[in-house]
Structure formats: C-alpha cells, structure tokens
Image: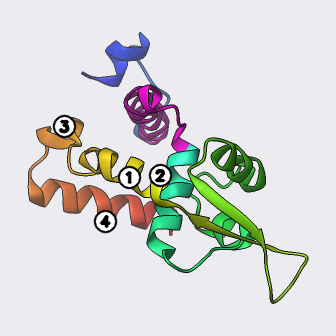
Amino acid sequence: MKLENEIFQPKFKSEYQKAALNIIYTCNWFTSQHSAKLKPHGITQQQYNILRILRGQHPKPASIKLLKERMMDKMSDASRLVEKLRIKGLIDRKVCKADRRNVDVIINEKGLELLKSLDYLDDNFKQLIALNDEEVKQLNDLLDKLRG
C-alpha cells in the first residue's frame, strides 16, 4: 500500500521527505511484524538479536562490549538484556578469567533450542515476496549506499 494511504498524507514536501518517512514507516512496520512473532516465545527483538550474536560466537563467550558493537539496535542496554536472558535461563554469564572487570556471556542449550525453533523467521520474510531477487539486491545496495 502506498505511504500516502497508510498515513493519510496526500502530499509531501519532496520525494526525499517521502523516502525518509517511507523508510521510517517501513522499519516500524517490519519491527511490529517481527515482534508479534517473537512475543509467544517470551522474548523481544533486542533479546533475539543478543541470542543470535551469541549463537554466532558459540562455543566462545562474548563480552558485553562485543554484544553492544554487534547489536542492530545501538540504543539498547546490552547489560540489562543479558540479565533478562540469564533470568529466563537462555544464557550463562560468568566473570571473565582474563579480566575480572568483564563478564563472559555464552548461550546455553536452552537458548540454542529456542533459536533453532525460531530459525524459520529468517527464511520466512513474506513481506519481501513482492520483490524479485534483483529488486531485493537493489534494495540492499540502496540501503547500504544510504548509510554510506
């Protein structure tokens, strides 16, 4: 559906303004869709992101600093997210042997099992089915170019 119809705004100052608003609106739309799929599993998008980073590191532990650097949402509080995941029993956290001021975070078996059950989300972006392979590549190239 056209942005104009979604937000009930028939005119924009420019195509640049419309493009910027379209990106923001689409991001929020995707976020809402993704969050709804994660909600029944009791995790947020940011927690899901932490779990995926930890699975990529597995079996090596990750530091909070590494998690912050690799997170998609740079405004998230990685320490708080790690604690919530620890309470849920999806990760383990230990004092780093090399530097006692840091902690090592590692995904555990329960966390790996949860991610395995959610792997279909990565392969099932039905929202993008309207685009063909070439258009998806072009979209990726344009978004990468936009971020510079």
Q: Amino acid at mark 2?
A: Lys
Identify the residue at the far top of this view. 8
Query: In this rendering, which labeled residue sits more in front, label 1 or label 4?
Result: 1
3D distance between C-alphas at marks 1 and 4? 33 Å
Query: In this rendering, which labeled residue sits more in front, label 2 or label 3?
Result: 2
Res 6 label: none
The N terminus sits in image quarter:
top left
Please, what is the dominant secondary structure of the magenta stretch?
Answer: helix
Give SS at disc 2. helix
Q: Which residue is mark 1?
A: 113
3D distance between C-alphas at marks 3 and 1? 24 Å
On screen, residue 35 above or below 1: below
On screen, residue 9 above or below 85: above
Give SS at disc 3. helix
Identify the residue at the far bottom of this view. 98
Q: What is the crowding at mark 2: few (fewer than 14 residues within 10 Å), some, or many (at least 20)? A: few
Res 110 label: 2
Q: What is the crowding at mark 4: few (fewer than 14 residues within 10 Å), some, or many (at least 20)? A: few
Res 126 label: 3
Q: What is the x, y in percent for residue 51? A: 52, 56
Res 141 label: 4
Query: Would residue 17 be counted in the magenta stretch?
Result: yes
